[in-house]
Image (cartoon, rainbow, N blue to C red):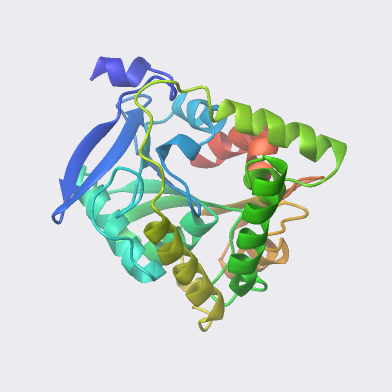
Amino acid sequence: MTDVAAAAFKDVPTRHIAGDGVPFVYRDLGPRTGIPVILLNHLGATLDNYDPRVVDGLAAKHRVIAFDNRGVGASGGRTPTNVAAMARDAVSFIRAMGFDTVDLLGFSLGGFVAQQIALTEPSLVRRMILTGTGPAGGEGIDKVTGLTLRAIVKGALTLRNPKYYLFFTRTANGRRAAKAFLARLKERTRDRDRPMAIRSFRAQLTAIHAWGSQAPQNLGAITQPTFVANGDDDLMVPTVNSADLARRIPGAKLSIYEDAGHGGIFQHHQTFVAEALAFLA
């Protein structure tokens, strides 16, 4: 598998594996030794929505695996309408890959899934990174559907990707970061993923709303070392949720990036990757 280990994320081949009857697609890069880092993605995201600077930065030191969960992109099955089922599907993928221990990096919706895995399958997780995310019942999470739909309409009217409005601040720095991030997502020109199905997108919105409306979980039961990161002006999952996570998860590390929104780890990818590598080490 030396071809996979050596490739950059924009060039690494898309592979397939079945877990509990679900055909998952994934991309796998970085060293073949050590604990793998499993990436858990955000609302509406396929394999082509991972920031290559973040993935390649982490893969310089760690094996990194990005995958489409059930019903997303080219993965088979039907996307669940709750986070608990999404977590079970992610565990099925991890087990199918043959891993007994992994590190998790969950962004936004992926951060909800990561928390659920840590609570229900604690022996599977060594360390966890939670970015642009929040706890069950967290402030403003139940409003994501409205925010997202308004951004989709605004994007259609202005011929911009909705992430331009949802992930970044409207300052000059934020606008520049948005354009650079969206350009990076186009670096891969071959073997691109299947677009997100509308049915799957709706299912994810339902799951996010339910997560934001449900009762808080006992995050004190999470014993894994945890790193929480976000921008200081997150529109989608208000930044106060990151502080709440760091307070409630024992010993968690918190980094808040200035003049940054939901996609703070993409805007400040150099700082984030350095901090993430230090944490994973």
Q: Is residue 255 visible?
A: no
> Is 99 on the left or on the right of 118, as rendered?
left
The location of residue 58, given as percent across then percent down, is 49, 31
Q: Residue at x 43, y 25 (%)?
A: 9
Q: Nearer the viewer, residue 74 or 89?
A: 74
- Image quadrant of residue 4? top left
Q: Nearer the viewer, residue 99 or 232?
A: 232
Quadrant of image for the N terminus? top left
Q: Residue at x 67, y 40 (%)?
A: 160
The location of residue 88, given as percent across then percent down, is 29, 63
Residue furthest out toward the right: 172
Work out whether 143 lies above or below 252: below
Q: Residue at x 44, y 22 (%)?
A: 10
- Image quadrant of residue 85? bottom left
Q: Is residue 246 visible?
A: yes
> Is 277 on the left or on the right of 113, as rendered?
right
> Is 93 on the left or on the right of 233, as rendered?
left
Q: Residue at x 38, y 58 (%)?
A: 200
The location of residue 91, given as percent across then percent down, is 28, 56
Work out whether 240 lies above or below 93: below
Residue furthest out toward the left: 21
**Count of numbered circles in the view:** 0
Residue furthest out toward the bottom: 215
Q: Nearer the viewer, residue 262 or 114?
A: 262
The location of residue 81, given as percent across then percent down, is 38, 70
